[in-house]
Image (tube, rainbow, N blue to C red):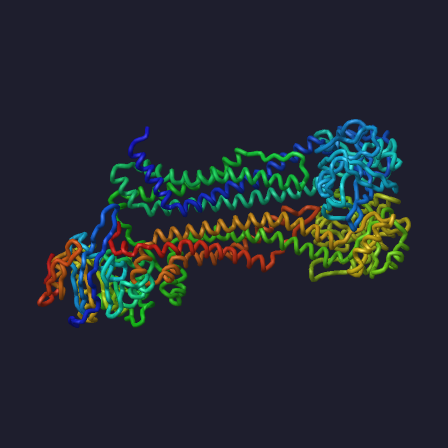
């Protein structure tokens, strides 16, 4: 039943809401952003997890991989018989040069066989356009989607590849994605380079014979039965493949694409928790404080309502409705924006990781959690304000409020008051009278500073680590990888080339490092003694030459093996004579990209045995000769790839810029919104509480500017206190990001530049000034005549 | 000190029309008024008679719809908001019915807040001594009675040595005894400092303490009475 009184109260509600529209709007926005970040970031993360699971199950993403020299297919049954193995698929897989127009570095293709009939059952692919190669055709290939997109290849186009020394024109009949290559990086590089590197799937009956692999395989993927012990199966697989040049099986946790994706998802999990949590807390705080203060300024009205017979319950319900409207509107707005942005978020990451199907799944649980938090805190604030007003007998509530009690606070008792002008004392006492409110406001603003620091720290950390990697540690202009190990005399040939100033040969040996029960497969890299192009960078001020004896390990590798300087690790070479030796650890360096285990090349030669060979070379060249040399070297048949760290850096920076700018843009908006909402509401409430006081000062001859100082001084102090606190919080947030992205692919350095601190402060101050300016304009419209009258 | 006879404020043909919906409300109709230097003027009238509107215009808080106001040789009616603020800051003191003290400042600091922005102010303690609050200077408004708060407000208004003091129902919120204390202070300030003082009230008894009394009715000055001599506040009863 709708009673007339209810209708009148509803009108009052609507008018109050309209009257307070500025404050309501800012609260609605914060609530909306809180709900939106929950749905976008957390919801996006959960959707990505589900998409990943669906993708993995659709393609039967394997549990274990191993590559080997060559084994007859009869070995398949031996692998199938290993307890815990539920399925086995063998493949032929070769890296080949591509003849791609318009590139100054050679293109590379990873050629993988698919069964002669049908699609691969284990380690499958998802055909996005076209079809699998015909069973009988000899030149049909399916190519990876990113490669097709980057090169503008469409079905029917052809690509020339040099397969086992022979050029062949291959016809594209399909494009596909595979979770094994969701993040596809050319050999020797750190980042994807889709224009020059692609994955090619060919029928086994076509690819095998080209490499003399009929009836044989050089890669196997396995599916494990539920509950199987990965380590035990790995050991058994290694034992079976050992006679065939097995390079050591590795589990899903070490699969490169999976590793990168997992790292990225972990980061999303952290961000998707921290940021929505910050927003929801700020929204909850604002709702609580704004509503309780708004309502306590309506005490006279509450007195009147009660005098006319409204019950406490009806009055309470009236103000609860106000809270419900603010948080309800925010929730609806945030849910809409969250679903929309969540879709974009999932698409962005999905494209980045080449997911075939992208679905943003709307989570009712998340929405319910977010709206409960905001509604709950709004209701609490409203009830608290209404209760304190309703507790008063109506007669007292209708009388003007007595002047609030003040007393000199602790700062003044310390003597600070004497040096402050009267205006300063007003500000100080007002803060000291409500210290919790001031602290919570400062905390709100500090969150905005912290979000900014965390956002920009990503740039700092990555810039620092790139600088460390490419300016201090990795100083070559070109990195050449040989197709097969070459005799060290190749050094002279390279040194004779015009423009080359330094040549350093390196040797790369796949090996398994073992310490106790922990083990890890790595490429052991040997660099010449006194290398100028590769140095050991412990930190910016501590750059050392390579030690003559012992291993230098990445910090993360040392952690995984649980070893430190002075310990020894058991090194088992996985190729050649397969020597097994104990090597001491000479140094551990905190590097940020990949994992490395390096040592003196002579030491490596000695330990690995066999002829002294080189896997590649590092070159320092004259700048103007770089591109010419690159082209010449890539043409050499013995060369597998030529990399330029400078180009890697460029590719990386372009990619980084894309993803980080979006993220930082969002964070900037978020942080600005929080700062504005906290400061604007603080000043507005202050104005409604002290409007009369300030207007009488205007009557007494205070200029607008002088009154503004009194009104906004409090917010200025809150902002200034919040900035250093925000820096500390931002540092802690950044620390949690660093921990969450500490993967073997890359780590982020906890480096926050003074510029980041400065910018975060400047943006926050700007937001504060903007909020102050909006409120300041209201001072111009103060009703001076009204203060001459008694309070209503 | 008595009236110098020279007009400090001169209003001519003042009118003020408020538009309320479809009707024009004439709050002031062609009012002529001189406020003479040093005099104590009482403006009497019922609510709605236009006395507050007149005081707001004379005090530089509102603008007339017609007519002019001159402060000495300066025309107030042509000033913008900032210049009106300056006029109030330099020449005018206000005492409000609701005191309007700053709750977070002590009595002394409330006075100091105004003397800080004045060019030739009294010492705040001296001003408070003048209103009989020499021993309450470090009290906050919440620790003072209504009469004491109003006396702080008077000290605040006079401490900057204004040329004109406007008081809008200064005793309206006070009981008789307290009201008399406040009026005594106003009377004393006017006599000792020679500040031209205009008091608005609907309490006819107060008129006896004035040099001159204006009765307002329907936006016009209905009657002007010059008291042959000012009664002391003790003599007044209401």
Specify the quadrant of the image occupied by residue A169. top right
Q: Nearer the viewer, residue A586 or A772?
A: A772
Where A505 sits versus A375, above or below? Answer: below
Does residue B119 show up?
A: yes
Residue A15 lies left or right of residue A485; in this view the side is: left
Is any part of residue A436 visible from this angle?
no
A326 on left or right of B22: right
**Rendered residue at 59%/41% (across/down):** A345
Residue A759 appears at what percent x and percent y?
A: 55, 57
Q: Is residue A10 left or right of residue B221?
A: right
Going by the picture, which residue comes out furthest to the top? A117
The image quadrant that residue A361 belongs to is top right
Give x and y (percent) for residue A619.
Answer: 81, 57
Query: Does residue A717 sit above or below B73 in this rendering?
Result: above
Q: How many numbered tags mark residues here?
A: 0
Residue A40: x and y, percent? 56, 40
Q: In which quarter of the image is the N terminus of chain A?
A: top left
In this view of the protein, which residue sits in the foreground, A228 or A348? A348
Residue A146 percent coordinates (x, y): 71, 41
């Amino acid at each position: 039943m709708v009673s007339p009184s209810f209708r009148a109260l509803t009108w009052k509600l609507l008018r109050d809401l309209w009257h307070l529209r500025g404050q309501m709007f800012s609260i609605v926005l914060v609530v909306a952003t809180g709900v939106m970040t929950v749905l976008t970031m957390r919801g996006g993360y959960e959707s990505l997890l589900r998409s990943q699971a669906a993708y993995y199950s659709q393609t039967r993403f394997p549990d274990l991989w191993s590559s080997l020299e060559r084994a007859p297919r009869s070995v398949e049954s031996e692998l199938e018989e290993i307890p815990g193995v539920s399925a086995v698929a063998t493949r032929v897989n070769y890296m080949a040069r591509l003849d791609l127009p318009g590139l100054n570095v050679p293109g590379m293709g990873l050629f993988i066989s698919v069964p002669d009939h049908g699609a691969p059952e284990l380690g499958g692919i998802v055909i996005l356009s076209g079809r699998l190669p015909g069973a009988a055709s000899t030149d049909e290939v399916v190519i990876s989607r990113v490669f097709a997109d980057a090169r503008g290849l469409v079905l029917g186009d052809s690509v020339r590849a040099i397969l086992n020394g022979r050029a062949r024109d291959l016809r594209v009949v399909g494009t596909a994605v595979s979770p094994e290559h969701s993040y596809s990086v050319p050999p020797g590089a750190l980042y994807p380079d889709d224009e020059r590197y692609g994955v090619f799937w060919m029928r086994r009956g076509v690819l095998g014979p080209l490499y003399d692999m009929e009836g044989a395989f050089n890669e196997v993927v396995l599916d494990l039965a539920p509950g199987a012990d990965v380590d035990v199966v790995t050991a058994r697989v290694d034992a079976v493949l050992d006679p065939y040049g097995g390079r050591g099986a590795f589990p899903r946790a070490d699969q490169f694409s999976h590793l990168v994706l997992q790292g990225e998802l972990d980061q999303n999990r952290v961000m998707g928790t921290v940021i929505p949590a910050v927003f929801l807390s700020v929204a909850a705080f604002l709702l609580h404080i704004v509503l309780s203060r708004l309502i306590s300024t309506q005490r006279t009205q509450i007195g009147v309502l009660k005098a006319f017979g409204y019950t406490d319950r009806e009055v309470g319900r009236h103000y609860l409705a106000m809270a419900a409207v603010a948080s309800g509107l925010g929730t609806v707005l945030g849910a809409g924006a969250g679903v929309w942005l969540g879709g974009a978020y999932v698409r962005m990451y999905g494209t980045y990781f080449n997911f075939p199907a992208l679905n943003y799944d709307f989570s009712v649980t998340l929405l319910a959690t977010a709206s409960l938090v905001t509604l709950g805190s709004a209701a609490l604030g409203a009830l608290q304000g209404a209760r304190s007003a309703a507790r008063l007998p109506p007669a007292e509530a209708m009388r003007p409020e007595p002047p609030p009690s003040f007393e000199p606070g602790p700062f003044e008792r310390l003597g600070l008051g004497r040096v402050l002008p009267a205006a300063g004392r007003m500000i100080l006492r007002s803060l000291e009278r409500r210290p919790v409110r001031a602290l919570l406001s400062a905390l709100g603003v500090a969150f905005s500073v912290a979000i900014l620091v965390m956002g920009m720290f990503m740039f700092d950390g990555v810039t620092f680590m790139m600088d460390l990697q490419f300016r201090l540690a990795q100083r070559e202009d070109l990195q050449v990888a040989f197709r097969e190990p070459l005799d060290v005399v190749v050094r002279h040939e390279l040194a004779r080339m015009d423009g080359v100033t330094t040549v350093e040969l390196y040797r790369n040996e796949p090996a398994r490092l073992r310490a106790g029960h922990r083990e890890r497969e790595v490429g052991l890299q040997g660099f010449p003694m006194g290398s100028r192009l590769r140095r050991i960078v412990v930190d910016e001020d501590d750059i050392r030459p390579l030690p003559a004896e012992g291993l230098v390990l990445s910090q993360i590798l040392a952690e995984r093996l649980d070893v430190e300087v002075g310990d020894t690790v058991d090194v088992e070479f996985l190729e050649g004579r397969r020597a097994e030796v104990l090597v001491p650890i000479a140094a551990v360096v905190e590097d940020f990209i990949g994992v490395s285990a390096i040592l003196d090349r002579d030491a490596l030669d000695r330990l690995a045995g066999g002829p002294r060979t080189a896997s590649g070379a590092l070159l320092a060249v004259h700048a103007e000769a770089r591109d010419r040399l690159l082209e010449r070297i890539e043409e050499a048949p013995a060369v597998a790839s030529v990399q330029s760290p400078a180009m890697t850096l460029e590719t990386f920076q372009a990619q980084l810029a894309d993803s980080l700018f979006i993220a930082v843009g969002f964070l900037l908006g978020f942080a600005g919104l929080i700062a504005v909402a906290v400061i604007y509401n603080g000043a507005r409430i202050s104005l409604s509480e002290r409007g009369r006081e300030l207007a009488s000062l205007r009557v007494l001859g205070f200029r607008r500017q002088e009154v503004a100082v009194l009104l906004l001084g409090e917010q200025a102090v809150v902002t200034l206190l919040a900035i250093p606190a925000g820096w500390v919080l931002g540092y802690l947030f950044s620390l949690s990001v660093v921990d969450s992205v500490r993967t073997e692919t890359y780590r982020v350095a906890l480096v926050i530049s003074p510029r980041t601190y400065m910018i975060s402060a400047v943006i926050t101050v700007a937001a504060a000034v903007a909020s102050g300016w909006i409120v300041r304009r209201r001072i111009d419209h103060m009703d001076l005549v009204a203060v001459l009258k008694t309070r209503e | 000190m008595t009236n110098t006879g020279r007009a400090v404020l001169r209003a001519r043909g003042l009118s003020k029309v408020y538009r309320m919906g479809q009707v024009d409300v004439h709050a002031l109709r062609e009012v002529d008024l001189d406020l003479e230097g040093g005099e104590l003027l009482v403006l009497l009238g019922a609510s709605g008679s236009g006395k507050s509107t007149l005081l707001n215009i004379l005090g530089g808080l509102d603008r007339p719809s017609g007519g002019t106001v001159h402060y000495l040789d300066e025309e107030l009616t042509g000033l913008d908001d900032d210049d009106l603020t300056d006029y109030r800051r330099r020449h005018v003191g206000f005492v409000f019915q609701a005191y309007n003290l700053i709750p977070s400042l002590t009595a002394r600091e409330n006075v100091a807040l105004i003397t800080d922005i004045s060019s030739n102010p009294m010492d705040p303690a001296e001003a408070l001594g003048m209103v009989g609050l020499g021993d309450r200077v470090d009290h906050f408004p919440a620790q003072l009675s209504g009469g004491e708060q109003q006396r702080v407000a008077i000290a605040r208004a006079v401490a900057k040595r204004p040329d004109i003091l406007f008081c809008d129902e200064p005793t309206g919120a006070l009981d008789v005894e307290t009201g008399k204390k406040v009026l005594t202070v106003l009377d004393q300030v006017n006599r000792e400092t020679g500040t031209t003082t205009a008091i608005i009230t609907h309490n006819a008894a107060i008129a006896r303490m004035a040099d001159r009394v204006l009765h307002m009715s329907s936006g016009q000055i209905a009657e002007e009475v010059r008291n042959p001599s000012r009664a002391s506040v003790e003599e007044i009863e209401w």
